[in-house]
Image (tube, rainbow, N blue to C red):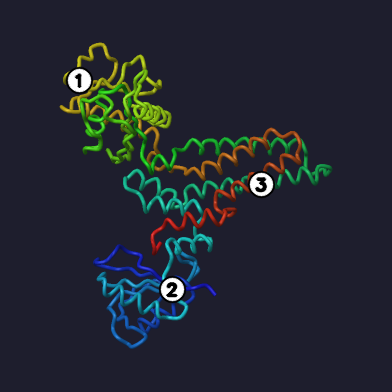
Amino acid sequence: MTDTIFALSSGAPPAGIAVIRLSGPQAGPALLALARRTPPPRMASLALLRDPRDGAPLDRALTLWLPGPATVTGEDMAELHCHGGRAVIAGVEAALAAMPGLRRAEPGEFTRRAFDNGRMDLNAVEGLSDLLAAETQQQRRAALMMAEGHFSRRIGEWRLRLLDLSAMAEAALDFSDEDDVPDAQIEQRIGAGIATLAADVAAILSAPSAERLRDGVRVVLAGPPNAGKSTLLNALVGREAAIVSDIAGTTRDRIEAPAAIGGVAFLFTDTAGLRDATSDRIEAIGMDRARAALEGADIILWLGPPGKVPRGDALLIAAQCDHVDHRGHPGLSVSARTGEGMERLVTTLLDRARGLLPGEGEYALHARQREGAALLHRHLMAAGEAHDLLILAEELRQARRAIDSLTGRAGTEDMLDRLFSGFCIGK
């Protein structure tokens, strides 16, 4: 028999209200034991909660009875909306823990039950995880799109179209000698359907990265020693994240500083000064790490000579313009000390970043989702290129398996355990 779990699902006490959730077959009896009555389903009711062990009053609270399966977890659920003091919460939880068949929930266990009972698929779970961790409005919007099932519904449409294509392929294989299944026409329809579906999947693969949205757009500041990288980094993030000194080679390693600017998450990286050669082994290691950072950068702010720009899309910065003559320099004149050009630089960064992130009404894909969609696309392309109907049908079957991996129907337990363990208790 499934255990009934309970947990505080609201913020840490003390608080104005504390919401304690129960889920499982004993949720109803537990509510009855505490409140001495069960309220009408899905209607809040005020009740005096008493400890079933000795009848002592615990709190006067709002109670909710939510019979399954039409609940978040797919099970019977109850909620107790108590006063948010520590003693009240401790008393109610102690009374629940003493009841047979009840136990405290593990991190993510409510969401895991929702997944196991088909109330959420893996994409919605990942969206909820991102929503709980969202720190910017852009992160919140994209996570909410995923949590509310926009991507899952797209996958559901793909699955139905795949089933239709597979059915036509089987018909072409099994009944090709029948007069009512014209081979040429059905194979043409299958080919056209595969091409259209493959194009739809390819369009989704161009969606922005959820990792970039979560961790921040990577902006790497690079250039020769004493170019003003550290001073500019500190000005951009609004704090003394990097040591500033006139001594060349002060920055020996990568310094990373996250910042939210204009509702967009950035991860700024200050790097060691780059020069042609050095006899300092530590400085050489720092330069190697700087070059590695450049390779993984979304945006590069290059504070060096325009002729040595490391990448064609780098933003050229004529730094320290308050005391360095940059006449003829094609870059953006900036002084982190006086603020000259900083507003224009920030505007340029935001314009670049927004082109890398989901816009209004769009979602972002995690690496797992991108890998699954890429696998689906490969099988569709292979099916479209197949000249043998048997091979085509097999590729379509593999495409359906790729879709199952996207929704979590074919997930591994280790991956699921790792995902749900990252949730807070009560979710």
Looking at the image, tell me whether mark 2 or mark 3 is earlier in sequence order: 2
Q: Nearer the viewer, mark 2 or mark 3?
A: 2
Q: Residue 103 shows which numbered tag?
A: 2
Q: How many labels sit on residues?
A: 3
In the picture as drawn, the residue positioned furthest to the right comes out as 177
In the picture as drawn, the residue positioned furthest to the top comes out as 328
The image shows residue 34, relative to residue 374, as above or below, that is below
Position of 352 with respect to 421 (left or right) is left
In the rendered image, residue 424, in percent from the top left (x then y), is placed at: 38, 60
Position of 284 with respect to 70 (left or right) is left
Looking at the image, tell me whether mark 3 or mark 1 is earlier in sequence order: 3
Choose between 386 and 113: the one closer to the eye: 113
Choose between 86 and 120: the one closer to the eye: 86
In the rendered image, residue 397, in percent from the top left (x then y), is placed at: 68, 46
Q: Residue 39 shows which numbered tag?
A: none
The amino acid type found where label 3 is placed reads: Asp
In the rendered image, residue 249, in percent from the top left (x then y), is placed at: 28, 26
Residue ID at (60%, 36%): 196
Looking at the image, tell me whether mark 2 or mark 1 is earlier in sequence order: 2
Q: Which residue is mark 1?
A: 321
Q: Around disc 3, counting alpha carbons within 10 Å, would you say few (fewer than 14), some (14 to 19), or many (20 or more)? A: some
The part of the image, by quadrant, that contains residue 294 is: top left
Q: Residue 164 shows which numbered tag?
A: 3
Choose between 183 and 269: the one closer to the eye: 269
Disc 2 on helix, strand or loop?
strand
The amino acid type found where label 1 is placed reads: Cys
Choose between 120 and 185: the one closer to the eye: 120
Residue ID at (47%, 51%): 149
Whether pointer 3 and pointer 1 mark residues with C-beta atoms closer than 8 Å, the reply is no
Residue ID at (47%, 53%): 124
Disc 1 on helix, strand or loop?
loop
Position of 241 with respect to 3 (left or right) is left
